[in-house]
Image: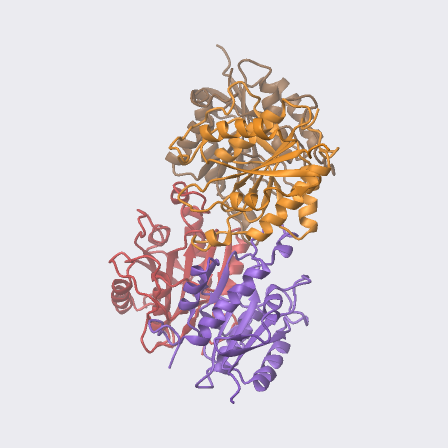
Chain colours: A orange, B purple, C red, D brown
Amino acid sequence: MSKPPRILLTGFTPFDGADINPSWETVHALDGRLIGGHLVVSRLLSTAFAESQRELSSMVDEVEPAILLGVGQAGGRSRLSIERVAINVQDARIADNNGAQPIDAAVVDDGPVAYFSTLPIKAMLKALIAEGLPAEVSNTAGTFVCNHVAYLMLHLAAQHRDRRAGFIHLPYLPSQAARLPDAPSMSKDDGVRALCIVLEVAATRRVDERFAAGALD
Amino acid sequence: MSKPPRILLTGFTPFDGADINPSWETVHALDGRLIGGHLVVSRLLSTAFAESQRELSSMVDEVEPAILLGVGQAGGRSRLSIERVAINVQDARIADNNGAQPIDAAVVDDGPVAYFSTLPIKAMLKALIAEGLPAEVSNTAGTFVCNHVAYLMLHLAAQHRDRRAGFIHLPYLPSQAARLPDAPSMSKDDGVRALCIVLEVAATRRVDERFAAGALD
Amino acid sequence: MSKPPRILLTGFTPFDGADINPSWETVHALDGRLIGGHLVVSRLLSTAFAESQRELSSMVDEVEPAILLGVGQAGGRSRLSIERVAINVQDARIADNNGAQPIDAAVVDDGPVAYFSTLPIKAMLKALIAEGLPAEVSNTAGTFVCNHVAYLMLHLAAQHRDRRAGFIHLPYLPSQAARLPDAPSMSKDDGVRALCIVLEVAATRRVDERFAAGALD
Amino acid sequence: MSKPPRILLTGFTPFDGADINPSWETVHALDGRLIGGHLVVSRLLSTAFAESQRELSSMVDEVEPAILLGVGQAGGRSRLSIERVAINVQDARIADNNGAQPIDAAVVDDGPVAYFSTLPIKAMLKALIAEGLPAEVSNTAGTFVCNHVAYLMLHLAAQHRDRRAGFIHLPYLPSQAARLPDAPSMSKDDGVRALCIVLEVAATRRVDERFAAGALD
């Protein structure tokens, strides 16, 4: 009997002084689940430009995923953000966890300016709203390690006909927001539920036919 | 054996076109619980100036509470707001559920300009933060039905030596935020957990000694 | 010939590490103007609880104003805030300019819980909006030195039949916002124009008849 | 004597029910100015996908600009946004001024996913902050007509060795914010001053050497 196709689902280590990262908390909870006929393989990436690139590369070699979904923390956002696009730039306001702070550098030297997500972002959005989860399509994943990993996932996926990729940002967890002056948050339970919904849609639907702007060949 | 002292815990009906109100969802879930040696009696108030006043008056007569805690919805706030003060004004931006829209009217004609909460707001805040729940002390409950009920509770409590009162605002529920352009929210589970913590503190602690500004006799 | 009645218009010194305070920048620009038949006397208050109280007291003795208008900085607000109420509490998140940081203390030991503004706040709001200036009625002046001075002005005014008082918060100046992560601002020119409009209304109109909640005798 | 090189500076017509657009108010004020040795030619674009494309094309043919700077309104932003990137998508939340509402369509059918600005965005940012004007580099120009025009300008500029382009978003004007619930704004004077600074930098400096990610050959 054949093995199911795999989803590589990544979260990040805490950064910027935090001791927790909602992305890993939720991603971790889904490791080993079978969603939409795909096996979820959860992996932890370092919040560091160079290191996450090496880690991602070896994870993809090992897991051979049909779908790559990166998950990151977007402190200050009030809802789950389904990223539409990743851009070929590293421009860090703070140092990463290894002390690197690239300014206006490229992610991939001869890569295109940007990639569109190759997951069905509008169908994912619709499914989340239908389940009462606050979500939006976002047009920027920033220019820190999240966008870097999103770009790399899409760059790697672009080299395989049957590999698709995307990225999602989560708000702070309530326990993080509790220690900040005034920040929105989403509970871990809702984050986990949202990822399940999103992966189910990603695993069973192609990119929306209407969404043709360079996203699919 | 004597009956335990009672907490009158109130939530509101949905308003402004909504079909749910996080205050009643969370308040309802605590009905009949014993917290800090007090029995919680949950009651639903109309989001209407005149009607909520009549309802509150008869609830207090019936329940004879030691503690009154009003809970309301503060759409747009990202954290649980423990109200410090209620002011003697009705100034409605929208009509209430009975079509009334008082502008710059008094809650109680000869009442004082304001009342401070007589619950230990700082201890409540500290307990919530310690449990990882986003919370703040707020200095305004607005000028709609929430402030109206908060003022009335404190007005009623001021006439009994052993009766204390306060008010708390909750953010939208995630299911409400899902249908709004960009609004923070708090899960029902966290809301219920927060009310338990707050009531435990209210039931077992007096107003903070340092908080003496008119709050206690 | 009799001297015109006077308006005591106060601004604050910079605080919390800033080197400028929009309140004094705008207040200073109006010193000596004749507005609505009143002479504007602009004065600078220290952003410090005890010192501002002494300063205000001696300014009032000297100027004998018919109208007191305090102006302060509300960093983070996007529009001019006409304060409706001042409360009898000092609760400082940061130390004032003299290092004092009162927590839950009273402004005036036996004073009432709060005072409503005795200026025509709704007419002021209407005039500002009509002139294209972003403004709102605010229901909290916070619990730092601004609220402290607002409360003191209203406390002093309450002792004279013909003395009225109020408080207004200004957003950051653009030059302040330029150095902050993401803060709204209002230009100095618009701030000055707004104060002129507000003072014209305050000098020529009584409190709105509809606004009777303790605001006027 | 040779004619100076030209800057094509565009603003938009009001949209979404507004009767004014800060972009045209400020852009219009600079028509005919000589900045950094360049002549500013101000032109008005329709807030409509198809029409703005035709208009822009004929403006470029007529003006033959060395620099194209599009200016638009970003309601809700608190500071001037210097856009880093434009993406090849039209995804309209509301209908444009001609009733068109493309969803997930391409701006240019076989165009690249995105273009980076070819103006020195970091030098522009630095100059604005130095002059006390609130500004930021933004990583999304949205997916409405602003991004559409930004993409088209960069697409057109990419076909000329000596043509550079970029896009800037302005906050609401104060007179717009005055009629909205709670929106940040920037005065017209500050907007005009900001555009002068930005154009001076654009006219006299090349793209930052550090910013090499696809922005320049």
Q: Is residue D185 left or right of residue D90?
A: left
| Residue at (47% x, 27% y) in the render | D199
Residue D14 coordinates in the image, percent (x, y): 63, 40
Q: Is residue B104 visible to us here?
A: no
Q: Is residue A90 above or below residue B127?
A: above
Q: Is residue A84 left or right of residue B69?
A: right
Quarter assignment of residue A202: top right
| Closer to the camera in the image, B155 or D167 | B155
- Number of marks present in the image shown: 0
Q: Is residue A76 left or right of residue B46?
A: left
Residue C187 coordinates in the image, percent (x, y): 43, 46
Quarter assignment of residue B8: bottom right
Most distant residue in the bottom direction: B1
| Residue at (56% x, 29% y) in the render | A151
Q: Is residue A200 left or right of residue D202?
A: right
Most distant residue in the top direction: D1
| Closer to the camera in the image, B116 or B35 | B35
Q: Is residue C76 above or below residue A214?
A: below
| Closer to the camera in the image, B174 or B153 | B174
Residue C74 coordinates in the image, percent (x, y): 41, 55
Residue A152 coordinates in the image, percent (x, y): 55, 28
Q: Is residue A185 visible to us here?
A: yes
| Residue at (52% x, 89% y) in the render | B1
